[in-house]
Amino acid sequence: MNILRFTIPKGSLGKATKQILKEAGLGLRGSDRSYRPKIIDAEIEIKILRPQEIPTMIAQGAHDLGISGNDWVDETSANVENILDLEYGGIKLVLAVPNIWDEVQDLASLIKFCASRNKPLRIFTEYIATTIEYLKKNPEYARLYGDDDPLVLTPWSRTGNNSNVCIMLSFGATEAKPPEDAEAIIDVTETGTTLEENNLKIIDVIKTSTAHLLANKEAMQDSWKREKIEDIKMLLRGVVEARNKLHVFMNVQRSNLKILLEKLPALKRPTISPLYGDDDWVAINTIIPKKDFISLIPTLRRYAQGIVVYEPRQILPFDSS
């Protein structure tokens, strides 16, 4: 039997990933402690890994398909095919410093601040490659240090030749490092609350990231695996679409139908059916963007009756794009 090897993340993305699989009809079975849960489809083999590892494992062919943040695709330079933005797990990768440093408002002023005091700029982060690229693109860094690579310290290696700027690998609790152990951190945040509680302020948003469905490029050349991946993509895309939409039913007098249709957004065109035994009224069945619903309330209240609103579980696309 053909098998598609599908790796999903643990940690902060894990719960949301299990939820989207469930909503897509691909619910997992097994103990919460298992790293190899079962899935309803016998042709799919699931394994749970850290999101940091997943892009590299997919690129190397250990797995055909996986879910991870696009921040880790960038950090690892993994050569994978980005199949679908799943639109959950949204984070920001930020540069943060102690909030008492009023004169430090961005990376350039941070570099100047440390250089003017003849002290090294120490940055703790999990994102080593991203941080190196970010620093070397900064004009102030280039003015002071040219093309020198910042010093990078990990427990097993020491690289780079610019000891004035030192990047240190963090193994967690990154926000606790400044000011004693570091001048700055580059870390992920959703709301910034944890940073604020640790007396830090965000001075730059380096990038944003969400969970993405990623595929091995060789797997996409295999006809059976490609079809299987397209099936999974369609099911997951159906959930992504549904989370942004509402299914609305209502009754409308025919005399009000034209003006209501002019104001009513729809996925394509609404379905309109006559009410049994009453030629003066019709029923409308439509899908609308969730973000538009509140603004439509005055119109619906004026021209419609018997309004029923559902949150759909899936809206499968009209094509495979």
Image (cartoon, grey):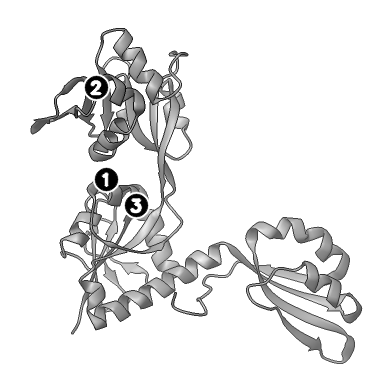
The reply to whether callout 1 and callout 3 are in contact (CB within 8 Å) is no
The reply to whether callout 1 and callout 2 are in contact (CB within 8 Å) is no
Pointer 1 local density, CA inside 10 Å: few below 14, some 14–19, many at least 20: some
Above-or-below relation of 15 to 134: below
Label 3 sits on a secondary structure element that is strand
Disc 3 marks a residue whose amino acid type is Gly
Q: Which quadrant does the C terminus fall into?
A: bottom left
> Which residue is painted at 77% across and 70% down in the image?
307
User: In front of the other: label 3 or label 2?
Assistant: 2
Residue corresponding to mark 2? 145
Q: Residue at the far left: name it.
A: 156
Q: Please tell me the numbered disc located at residue 69.
A: 3
Q: Please tell me the numbered disc located at residue 168.
A: none
Label 1 sits on a secondary structure element that is helix
Residue corresponding to mark 1? 75
Real-space CA distance between mark 1 and mark 2, rounded to the nearest whole angstrom: 23 Å
